[in-house]
Image (spheres, helix red, strand yellow):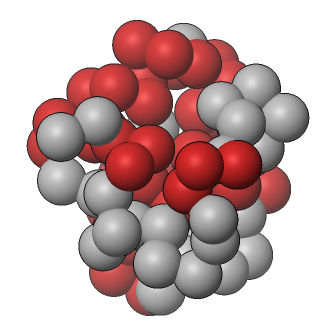
Amino acid sequence: METLQKVALFWDVDRAKLDADQSADFIIRRVLARGDIDDVHWVFSRYGKERVAAVARAARDFDSHSAHFWKTHFEGAYAS
């Protein structure tokens, strides 16, 4: 299933109106917090590591497990 169409990721928005460009930061945060490995691969291929890392650094809505995981992944690129 296409990442942007997954109810489990985007239960609270109208997925038909979700724009991958205009809502990029929201999509990246949601996938990093709740996506599966295929979703994470999709977000990195769609937006690139630099953009994903920048959004992760700025995110303040990650749970502690997600924040720690992505902090480790990006080698301490942002504080939790």
Nearer to me, 55 or 24: 24
Q: Quadrant of the N terminus?
A: top left
- In screen coordinates, is 53 left or right of 35? right
Q: Residue at x 67, y 47 (%)?
A: 18
- Which image quadrant for residue 26? bottom right
Q: Is residue 39 something that shows in the picture?
A: yes
Q: Position of residue 56 (x, y in %)?
A: 62, 50
Q: Residue at x 76, y 26 (%)?
A: 21
Q: Is residue 35 above or below residue 42?
A: below
Q: Is residue 67 something that shows in the picture?
A: no
Q: Position of residue 5 (x, y in %)?
A: 38, 49
- Which image quadrant for residue 31? bottom left
Instruction: Report how many numbered discs are placed on residues in the image.
Output: 0
Q: Residue at x 47, y 86 (%)?
A: 63
Q: Is residue 23 above or below residue 72?
A: above
Q: Residue at x 66, y 80 (%)?
A: 61
Q: Quadrant of the C terminus?
A: bottom right
Furthest toward the bottom, the residue is: 64
Q: Position of residue 50 (x, y in %)?
A: 63, 19
Q: Position of residue 6 (x, y in %)?
A: 32, 57
Nearer to me, 48 or 3: 3
Furthest toward the front, the residue is: 16
Nearer to me, 56 or 72: 56
Q: Is residue 15 above or below residue 13?
A: above
